[in-house]
């Protein structure tokens, strides 16, 4: 045995004694990867996190010694990862953060240069911060680990342009050993990783399509109510845990509320709008079993603490087959058979390609971001503020910022994952033209990937074979029930879902709305309730009010939460004498249909307020309506549960203020009913 192999064995023995992780003994593939890294050979590893790529570089770092730089996709969990490295691998790690003061950053840079740390952790976005970059390169690392390296490719669903700056960093380090990690990467993505980082003649380690005991199914369904019925039918067997994937935040919230109401299963929601603490708490409760159902947007990464999940459901079609594989890998885990069910909604399939065309902001949006940064004059700007100002999703804001930063149109002085301090210089039109060409390429790639998902849903071949061939993976021998094409079996009993509705919620009150006013990014009103409301509110159609009220009354009778209300009250119009405002017309008709008295218990106390639709943020809307209502019929609502009716639920500030006013006047409880809700907080639709 060579001295190098003996050192690796010693490190593995020490790790086995101290590690709290499940994986402490590498397999043959991991062992070869560790030896290659210690020998100074670069690697491209395409494997899920459970494969053990982190184990490989940690063992190599401990065996060879010297500094290691880890470039993560996010700074969210870097402090926690530094603690885990010290506990599991005996490596002293320093997480870098662009929010630190210049004095602290300089002190950390001096400590890194003096060799106080074995590992330096930095997020790829913060490498655009000069202080973070200087600290990362203070002591030249012999090994650079690039996590989520697939994001450097425009073929990747989660493409991150900031990864392109890693190439300049590697060139400055003069041929370090590089370990590029990707959970999934089709052949074009692998080629982009090698070309754009770049990796000179790397060894490739590609894990096979190993989905033990998982049965892949696609249920071909005509519309959304059919998908709801099928989802509830799948839950009739009361699985220990179920993981549901949706494409939008509002859809995820609706599904979680539907699961809780129908089957009384504790359900949670995770999406891009939750904080890191809320996300971690939801995953912890899901692992512990206090949450039986978890509805997520996008995908989740399975780690060594992931619980067994007997059922995963793709309620919405995934954008790419790579995203589908990432979601499927969350299923199973205890050696028992698990099912992975994808809902092929024939109404949603054509929209998948249209969504591909909206994957990148337009040049006009990029110009709007440049003007906002220019107006800030070097002050800190958060991505949320830019999102509210431009109507872009924060991820799209990041793409626009990178499109301006790379060619020098923005001079960044400090940088975080979701904020920056920069000065805008004169914008060359050629920069926008170059960006427009790259965005067009990205859109065409997304449309082609959407076509692959549709083909996967309609294929008559073995689904595993199709997936392995499309992603360039080796398919292992068939194990158990492979897919619904190889081993078809009948579906069980159907369960009727409740009436389609979307949950609405304020800090203290909750209720339901019939539908979304507009789909995110959509220009037309597709839902019946949205068209009726538009006709009532903006076209003055007298027939729209009773028809819309009938739909809302049916929803109130269908939902037990609303059915228990004893009196109906509208959100008051600005003019107390106005009997034609939509909330008053709807509440009057609903009270007749559900057989509950209607009380105009509230009046507006101020006519000088700015219209809510003219305000951008939730804070401004809440301040605008603070103290805006007075109770004039307290005896009608005292000690009763009130059904508060409004036409549009946007930020929820108006209904929250009205509900609080009713409660202060003696109402036992207030529950909310709206005709439509908007996607406030992502893109403003009204």
Image (cartoon, rainbow, N blue to C red):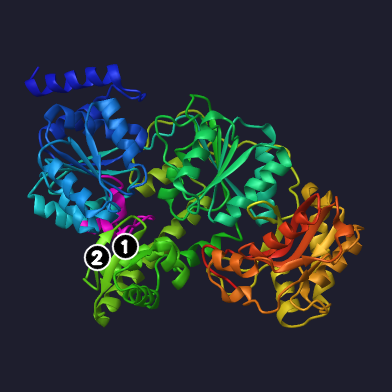
**Residue 282 against residue 412 in the figure, above or below:** above
Q: In the shown orientation, is residue 361 left or right of residue 353?
A: left
The residue to which callout 2 is attached is 412
Element class at badge 1: strand
The residue to which callout 1 is attached is 420
Element class at badge 2: strand
Which quadrant of the figure contains the C terminus? bottom right
Q: Residue at position x 83%, y 60% from top? A: 553
- Residue 323: horizontal and vertical position, in percent? 43, 49
Q: Are marks 1 and 2 in contact (CB under 8 Å)?
A: yes
**Residue 487 against residue 380 in the figure, above or below:** above
In which quadrant of the rendered view does residue 67 lie? top left
Separation of disc 1 and disc 2 at Cα? Answer: 7 Å
Q: Specify start and end residues of the magenta stretch as a single range.
A: 146-165
Which quadrant of the figure contains the N terminus? top left
| Residue 187 visible in the current orientation | no
**Residue 180 against residue 618 in the figure, above or below:** above
- Residue 259: horizontal and vertical position, in percent? 67, 43
- Residue 18: horizontal and vertical position, in percent? 29, 19
Q: Residue at position x 73%, y 42% from top? A: 262
């Amino acid at each position: 045995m060579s001295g190098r192999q003996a050192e690796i064995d010693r490190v593995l023995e020490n790790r086995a004694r101290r590690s709290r992780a499940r994986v402490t003994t590498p397999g043959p593939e991991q062992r070869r990867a560790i030896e290659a890294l210690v020998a100074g050979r670069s690697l491209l590893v395409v494997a899920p996190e459970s494969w053990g790529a982190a184990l490989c570089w940690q063992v190599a770092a401990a065996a060879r010694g010297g500094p290691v730089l880890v470039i993560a996709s996010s700074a969210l969990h870097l402090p926690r990862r530094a603690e885990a490295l010290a506990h599991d691998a005996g490596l002293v790690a320093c997480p870098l953060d662009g929010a630190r003061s210049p004095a602290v950053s300089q002190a950390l840079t001096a400590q890194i240069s003096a060799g106080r740390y074995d590992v330096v952790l930095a997020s790829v976005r913060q490498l655009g911060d000069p202080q973070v970059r200087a600290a990362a390169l203070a002591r030249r690392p012999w090994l650079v680990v690039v996590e989520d390296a697939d994001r450097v490719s425009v073929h990747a669903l989660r493409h991150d342009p900031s990864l392109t700056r890693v190439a300049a960093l590697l060139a400055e380090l003069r041929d370090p050993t590089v370990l590029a990690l990707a959970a999934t990467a089709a052949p074009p993505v692998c080629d982009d990783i090698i070309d754009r980082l770049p990796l000179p003649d790397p060894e490739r380690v590609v894990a096979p399509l190993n989905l033990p005991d998982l049965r892949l199914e696609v249920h071909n369904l005509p519309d959304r109510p059919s998908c709801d019925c099928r989802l509830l039918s799948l839950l009739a067997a009361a699985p220990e845990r179920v993981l549901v994937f949706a494409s939008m935040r509002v859809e995820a919230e609706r599904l979680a509320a539907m699961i809780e109401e129908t089957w009384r299963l504790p359900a949670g929601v995770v999406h891009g709008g939750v904080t890191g603490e809320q996300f971690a708490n939801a995953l912890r409760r899901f692992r512990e079993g206090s949450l039986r159902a978890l509805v997520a947007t996008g995908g989740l990464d399975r780690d060594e603490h992931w619980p067994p999940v007997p059922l995963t459901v793709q309620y919405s079609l995934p954008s790419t087959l790579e995203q589908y594989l990432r979601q499927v890998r969350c299923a199973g885990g205890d050696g028992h058979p698990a099912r992975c069910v994808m809902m092929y909604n024939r109404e949603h399939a054509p929209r998948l390609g249209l969504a591909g065309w909206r994957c990148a902001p337009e040049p006009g949006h990029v110009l709007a971001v440049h003007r906002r940064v220019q107006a800030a004059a070097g002050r800190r700007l958060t991505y949320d503020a830019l999102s509210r100002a431009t109507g872009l999703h924060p991820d799209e804001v990041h793409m626009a910022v990178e499109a301006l930063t790379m060619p020098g149109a923005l001079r960044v002085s400090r940088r975080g994952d979701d904020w920056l301090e920069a000065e805008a210089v004169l914008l060359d039109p050629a920069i926008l033209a170059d960006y427009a060409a790259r965005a067009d390429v990205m859109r065409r790639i997304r449309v082609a990937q959407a076509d692959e998902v549709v083909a996967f849903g309609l294929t008559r071949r073995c689904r595993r074979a199709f997936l392995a061939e499309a992603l360039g993976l080796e398919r292992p021998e068939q194990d158990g029930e492979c897919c619904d094409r190889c081993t078809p079996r009948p579906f069980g009993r159907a369960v009727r879902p409740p009436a389609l509705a979307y949950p609405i919620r304020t800090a203290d009150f909750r209720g339901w709305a019939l539908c979304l006013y507009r789909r995110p990014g959509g220009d037309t009103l597709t839902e019946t309730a949205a068209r009726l409301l538009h006709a009532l509110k903006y076209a003055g159609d007298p027939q729209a009010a009773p028809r819309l009220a009938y739909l809302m009354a049916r929803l109130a009778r269908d939902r037990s939460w609303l059915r228990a209300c004893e009196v109906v009250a509208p959100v008051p119009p600005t003019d107390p004498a106005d009997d034609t405002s939509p909330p008053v017309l709807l509440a009057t008709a609903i009270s007749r249909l559900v057989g509950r008295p209607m009380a105009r218990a509230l009046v507006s106390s101020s006519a000088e307020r700015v219209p809510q639709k003219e305000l951008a943020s939730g804070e401004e809307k809440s301040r605008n309506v603070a103290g805006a209502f007075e109770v004039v019929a307290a005896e009608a609502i005292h000690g009763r549960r009130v059904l508060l009716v409004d036409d549009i639920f946007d930020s929820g500030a108006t209904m929250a203020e009205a509900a609080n006013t009713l409660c202060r006047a003696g109402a036992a409880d207030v529950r909310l009913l709206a005709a439509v809700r908007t996607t406030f907080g992502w893109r403003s639709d009204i």
